[in-house]
Image (spheres, helix red, strand yellow):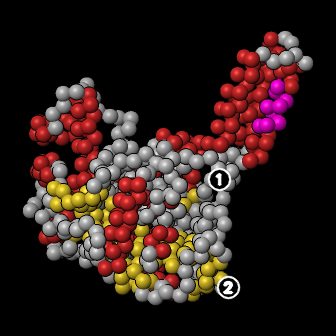
Amino acid sequence: MKKHSPGFWIGFGLLLAVMLAVLELNKNTLFGFALLAVAAFLFVYLHGRVRHGALRFLCWIGWIALFAAILFTTWPPTKRVPAVEGKNGGPSGIVMTDKGKVQGVKTADGAVEIFTGIPYAAPPVGELRWCVPQSAKSWSGTLVCDHFAPMSMQPTNLPIYDSLAQIIGYHDYRISLTDNSVAPVSEDALYLNVFKPAGEQSALPVFVYIHGGSLQTGQPWYGDYRGESMAREGVVYVNFAYRLGVFGYYADEELMAESPFGTTGNYGLLDQIAALEWVRDNIAAFGGDPNNVTLAGESAGAAGVSALCTSPLAEGLFERVILESSTVASVEPPHSFRLLDEALESGRALRERHGVSNLAELRALSAEELVGEAATQHHMTVDGYALTETPYESYRRGVHNEQAILHGYNSRESGPFILFSQADMKNYEDKVRAYFKEYADEILALYPAGTDEEARANWAEIYGAIFFDYSHYCLNRLATANGIPVWEYYFSRDNGRLGPWHSGEEVYFYGNIPADSRLYDARDRELSAQMFAAFCRFTAAGDPNGEGAVAWERNDSSGRVMEFGDETRMIDEREHALFAIFDRMQGWED
């Protein structure tokens, strides 16, 4: 056998490293790594046995082809996510719900009991697709609730894409031998999860969280907002999946006629109400107080919370709310919301795209055929049932369900949304004029740009204000006009991960910065302790202030916010001049 040259070993090593990286990033099974090792050995052996250059080239091609076969034959299997990763503390106590007994699992230290995959409504499949959520069926025996149910049906990416997003977007990827699988997605996803302090408890404050994801994506087990930390502080934490995209927000005249309530377009919102009704009826069995519920959400989840604040169906289901990085309280909400005529027109266009003429034919399509419509069907609708009018109109009439509000936004909300469409001196003015039209000159005078850096920074702030910041200003004014106590924050802390980009505050507020993460320093951990404590105090008693904490003034003037950043301090709202222009654009009435 011919001795291999140094050039061969360099090429071999580089290609092998790429292959190993692809298998790891794509979450292929460990068997795939074993097969690759065998294939690499065979390649080296055969390459050394042949002398003709063409045959050696074929050896390289053969190895690459064999790797492709390994990649697809050892694709990561679909597995439900366990309630506790790694070693757990054994089974929890048994809890009796209104549908039957459930048993969860304890964290490794035994301090928290987690119950995952509890059905709160019937599976919305078949004839129940696009129906108001129906009651879950009772079960006999004890339902073991130690794995999360599938995430709601949604578009999914290749595992390698998600891994690269974790590296590029979050700078937070860890090589592991225990994550060689992908989580399932399903229309059958109306399940919730409860995190509680271990043992017998009673009358504890309850925190219900609605995940974000543009009403198109998302799942309840993400580490930044999991509930173990809150449970350790004496809070019963609940989160859940709800219908997304076309399955949650499709609107259709036939569906309106079919519904006994004349509703369409709000199935995901109705799921959220059904989950809150489950909490009302069952949370006492887990040690929670059904009369002390805080409802919270981030991004599209906060948009849902904002809508529920004025939904007649949600009256009495919660006492206070937390809204992170979104509301639908402006005159014209910038996302996640539309009027019924627009929703119905969008539904008609969908039927035409899929070549169906009636509801029966549409229900006969598989979930996989419809899931790609998420980007066209992800808006709550003023349907006359769940939402009788816009939240702005309800607040103006003094109609609301919450008794206290904590809300806010981040300094660089726009980061992930304009990552590939940033402004420079060539396009900055065009971007401003395209959106603001007759108000563009005022915007350009307020945010002049003389360099690419200034143009980029200005557009990032303006974009964030359009889609996130301004709606919080609207909510704050509506709340104070109704006598609702309200506290507002502004998160500006940079770190090695997301920093103050959209959703970057969550890991702080929920007390979930990993103990071994080097992406955060001592100030980050101190800040997280302050933010987490404020959340817990607000959840328990409706006021984020407490002994030893920096005083958080109520935002009665809609001008003073708490900055959580390099310092924790009260500051003046920074964008009032910009918001005044938005007011005139939308026709805000004081």
Residue 452 in the image: state x and y as whole percent. 26, 28
Relative vertical location of residue 24 with respect to residue 126 in this rendering, above or below: above
- Amino acid type, label 2: Gly
In which quadrant of the rendered view does residue 138 lie? bottom right
Q: Residue furthest left?
A: 590
Is 369 left, or right, of 73 in this rendering? left
Asked if one can make out residue 275 in the rendered structure from this viewpoint, the answer is no
What residue is shown at x 22% (from left), y 54% (from top)?
470
Asked if one can make out residue 84 in the rendered structure from this viewpoint, the answer is yes
Q: Which residues are magenta?
A: 36-44
In three-dimensional space, the C-alpha distance between marks 1 and 2, rounded to whole angstroms, equals 32 Å
- Amino acid type, label 1: Asp
Mark 2 secondary-structure assignment: loop
Q: Nearer the viewer, residue 221 or 178?
A: 178
Which residue matches tag 1? 179
What residue is shown at x 59% (from left), y 76% (from top)?
110
Which residue matches tag 2? 141
Classed neighbour count for the residue bearing mark 1: other residues with Cα under 10 Å, few (<14), some (14–19), many (≥20): some
In which quadrant of the rendered view does residue 386 lie? bottom left
Relative vertical location of residue 160 with respect to residue 11 in this rendering, above or below: below
